[in-house]
Structure formats: C-alpha cells, structure tokens
Image (cartoon, helix red, strand yellow):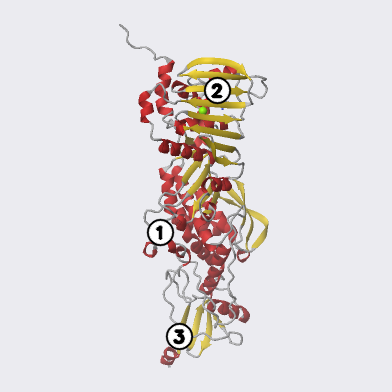
Amino acid sequence: MDIIHLLPDSVANQIAAGEVIQRPASCLKELVENSLDAGATHIQVLVRDAGKTLLQVVDDGKGMSETDARMAFERHATSKIHEAADLFELRTMGFRGEALASICAVAQVEILTRQEEDELGTLLEIHGSTIVRQEPVQCPKGTNLKVKNLFYNVPARRKFLKGDQTERRNLLNEFYRIVLVYPEVQFTYIEDDEILIDLPVTNIKQRIETVFGTGGKQPFTSQLVEIRTDNDLVSIYGFIGKPEAATKNAKQYFFVNGRYMRHPYFHKAVLNAYTGMLGQDMAPAYFIYFEINPETIDVNIHPTKTEIKFADEQMIFPILTATIREALGKFNVAPSLDFNTDGHIEIPVIAHPKHTSFEQPVITRQPTYNPFHSSQRITTPHDWQQLYDRPSAPIRPSEPALPIPVSFVDLPLVQLNGKYILLPTDEGLLLVNQHRAHINILYDQYLRRLQDHDGQVQQLLFPDVWDVDRADLPLVEVLVTDLRSIGFDLTALTPVSYSINGVPAMLAGNSTIPVLQNILDIIRDLGLSAQQQWHEKIALSMAQSTAIPYGKVLTQKEMQHLLEELFALPKYRYTPDGKNVAALLSQEQIGRFF
Ligand code: ADP
Ligand code: MG
C-alpha cells in the first residue's frame, strides 16, 4: 500500500506559517512590507491586545484586482519575482509569496482592496485558508487588511505567545526597523484606539529623532555623528553615537538596501572603531545604512530575512571601521558642531601662530600622536577625545638644546658641498643638513594641511592619469580625501583611474605619479584600520619627495629663510623618522684641532 501523499494546502500552509509567522510582530512586518512594496505613501498600523485579537494594516498603495486578491493568499503566489534569476536582483521587501498564505492559515483574515482604475473594490474573508466570503464593495484605493485572532486554530502556538507587554514591545521593535528606513513614507501606529506614534514624511535624521527623541533633555540626534562613505563596493550612510553617550543597551540598527539586518560581523567592525573609548559594558548607538549591489548579497538564507550574507564582507569590514573612526576624529575637532545643519560636518580651521621670533610660546598641538598604540590606550569614556590630541608619542629622539641665534638676518651663512649650511654661533659651529631641514619644515606644513583641509592647488596644464590596481581600490577611495586636502585635484576617470588635474603647489615640477604611488605603498603597509597613522606617513612621504635635494645651491636669503623656518618648529632636531638634522661642532672640539 502506498503511504506517501501530498499534504492539503491548508496543512502545508500552517506548517510554513510556523517559520514565517511566529508572533504578531512577524505579521506586522510582512503586512507593512507588502504595503511598502505596493508603493504606499501612508501606512497605518492598528493593534488591539498586543496584536493577539487584532492586527490591521491600512495602506494607500496600488491595491489588488479581484483575481489577484484571491491569488495573493495562495502559497508561493507573488507578483514580485518570476524566475529564479530574479532572486539575485531583489529590490522589493517580499518575494517568497508565503506571507499572506501563512497568515491566512492561522488567523481570520479580512481584506478590503481596490486598484485606482477599478470602481469597486473586493472584500474577502478567509478563515484558516478557507474563503468564507467574497463580494465587491466600495472602498478607498489601496489595501486594508485585518488579521483577527492570530493562532485561533493552533492552540499550541497561541499558548506560545508571550505576555502582552512583551508582544507589544516586539511589535514596536519590528515597526521601528521598518520606519527607520522609509522616512519618505508617513506611518501611524494606533494601539487600542489611541494614536501612539505618528511619523510625518521627513529625512532619516529627523525620523530617528521622532522615533527615539522623546523624553531626553537634549535632542537624541545631538548625541549622534553622521557617517558617509561611497565607493565601488558599497555606500555607507548613517549616524553613530558619540562615545560618551554610550549606554548599556544602545539602539543599534543596520540596514541594507532598505531592509533591516542583523550582522554580528559588521557589529564587530563598529565596535573596533570605538576601541579604547567606551566604558565597561557600554555600547554606542548606531543607525547604519548600506547600499550595495543586490547581486552581492543573499537575503534568502533565513525565512524572516534578517540574516544577510555579503559576498565582500571582509573588504567592507575595514571600510566600515575606518569610516566610523574618521567621523569620530572629525567630531572631536569640532565638538560643538551643530548637528542640525544638514549636509557635511564643518571642520573649523585651527589658527596656527606665525613664528616670527623664538620667544613665541611653544606649540602644543601634536597631530602625530598615535591613538591606537596599545601602551597609550585610554579606557575611561570621558577621556576619549584625548585619543586624538594627546601629546605626541616620542618617535623622534629627545632634543638636546642647540645654541640658536635670535635672528639669522645678518649672519653670514656658508653652504658646504651643496649639502650643509654652516652657521657660526657663540658655542661653536652649527651644521644643518639642508635636505633634512626642509623635510621637517614641509612635514609640518603637510600635516597641518591634512588636518585643516587647506592645501593649495597648482593646476596642471596637462592632467596626468593615475591608474590604480583594482586590489587597492578600497584604500584609494579613502586615501583620495586625504590627497585632496593637501592639494591634489583628483577626479575619478574610470572605476580604476583618476585624472590628476592639479597638485600641491609645493610639488609643482616633480613627477606626480611616483609620489602618489609611493604614498599608496606606505598606506597599503599600514592598512585601512591604521588610518590614524596615515596623515603622518603621507606628510613624511610628501616632504621627502619635495624637499630641496642635496646639491642644490642656495642663496644667502634662501638659507636664512630655511633656518628661520626650521628653528621655529617645535621639533627641528630630528626628522620624523629619527634622522639627525643639525649638529654642533663646539668651541672645545674645534680647539682640539689646534
Ligand atoms: P510576497 O510579498 O513575498 O510577494 P505575500 O504573500 O506577502 O508574498 O503577498 C503576495 C502578493 O499579494 C504580493 O506579491 C502582492 O502582489 C500582493 N499583495 C500583498 N499585500 C499587498 C498590498 N498591501 N497591496 C497590494 N498588493 C499586495
Ligand atoms: Mg510579502
């Protein structure tokens, strides 16, 4: 006797419902997603008894024809994909065609729907997969779907539901995950006949504020910093919490292509960026939106679709960390930036004292400090700003005092071998290496330009083309910002090349490509995660490439100028990589020759 038979649809649907519909919140998700897919501009959610007796979603979307309305409740009935290949180009929220069939299998469903062009709409009532009523009705354009007495026919599942408070929270959490991605849609949430949440059409930042901003003394969004990055691989946009605003259970949201997702791996990338800035058990808030080619992600690995697999997640990880770090660093330069001025974050230019004499106060701002050097890690949350402006770690040897004259104007200077500048002083003969002296001067200038974004550009008559290795693209995307800030005028030519339209004024005359290539080699060694050290290395590399070479004959004026600038630096004695710049041949040493 044959014993295998196909299950009746109603049973199959009930089983499937176990996967897709676990609780009122999953129902809410599926229904609201359908409304969004139908192009609704206003979506109302009505809830009674934590969704256990009623969950209703009313939209003004495109509605359904009579036939479609019936079809919609069949398993694997969907208007959204036609063939397997479509699965890889998903742009809609739904695609499985399982939700309505599942909901109908385990509840009493009533639907009113009308398409714009139809005069009459359709009323359909379905109890546990069976159509109990169908008639034409007058109703507004769109779809109005009531799910009553969820799990009325599956007592075991109904018992499985949590208390009202928990289910209520689940519903709201699900609601937040959706409304945070669709600020252009108006949402209303009505609980037991009372309007609980009303969200007008707005932008993402304001939507976050309306959803979470209630209660605090300050706007919730004043605790957040904007992040943004854009490259071939992925676009990332969003807001991250300031470290000092971290809490024990911060709001943390990832979205990809308009869909909420959980992503423990990217979560680590975020936390990475906060290393050393958070107190014990404290977590930063984040609202991070990824836009990525849908072919490179797989949303189909989980029935509720919150676990999403990224093909390039190992490349995205460091980009995410670097983007957040950069935002935190910028924020620190401008702690009082006004979050409400839309657009990019303004970085105030820090004025640098002009050095006219040596009595000038010593400059204490040390941009060379490396915050990610483990021995210098600070762990209290209040001190995190210092990570970015603590005094420099002494990469250069300590500086023994040299006898420096007050002014160089009338001193006779001698150039030796096109290499050294000789300067008689009371203590002896001071020797200065001209190339290294210039490196120090330029290093200081480049570093400042990198921080203040005020590089001067020398436009090129004939733009150069910089071809980039594909493997270096994620690095270069980030690096380009730094290069622009020291005066490179770069525009993307193709995905793998840049047009160099201008160069830093100091670089004019040098060949550009080797300079850029050299910087890239250094950055590659450091990696994206060490972005805080990039500035120093870029500044040093640029300084080395552009410093006056050995052999260059200098005039009196040039030598005076060079020494004046050199000795005005807070650190002039050694180059950033520790090489000797100046030495003193003392009276005593000279005396010994005779
Ligand atoms: P899926 O969303 O995966 O396609 P569903 O079971 O959720 O599957 O919905 C089945 C079909 O019903 C959808 O493809 C769509 O054509 C139609 N539909 C569902 N809800 C709505 C709605 N609110 N407005 C218009 N059409 C809808
Ligand atoms: Mg759906």
C-alpha distance separating marks 2 and 3:
96 Å
Going by the numbered disc 2, the residue's amino acid type is Ile
Estimate the x, y position of residue 577 in percent, counting from the top left: 45, 68
Q: How far separated are the C-alphas under marks 1 and 3?
A: 46 Å
Circle 1 Cα neighbour tier, 10 Å, few/some/many (<14 / 14–19 / ≥20): many
Is the C-beta separation of discs 1 and 3 under 8 Å?
A: no
**Residue 40, located in which quarter of the rendered image?**
top right
Q: Which residue is mark 2?
A: 111
Q: Which residue is mark 1?
A: 276
Residue on which disc 3 sits: 585
Q: Which dot marks residue 581?
A: none
Q: Position of residue 494 (x, y in %)?
A: 60, 45
Quick one: SS at disc 1?
Answer: loop
Report whether 494 appears left or right of 311: right
Q: Report the residue at 55% width, 60% height from top.
A: 515
Which class describes the residues within 10 Å of circle 2: few (<14), some (14-19), or many (20+)? some
Q: Is residue 422 above or below residue 147?
A: below
Q: Nearer the viewer, residue 440 or 511?
A: 440
Residues tagged 1 and 2 counted as in contact (Cβ below 8 A) = no
**Which residue is rendered at x = 49% and y = 26% of the image?**
147
Residue at screen point 45% across, 58% down:
244
Residue drawn at point x = 51 percent, y = 77 percent: 362
Badge 1 amino acid = Gly
Q: Is residue 560 visible?
A: yes
Viewer-proximal residue among 93 and 49:
49
Residue 257 seen from this side: no
Quarter of the image where the N terminus is located: top left
Secondary element under disc 2, as helix, strand or loop, is: strand
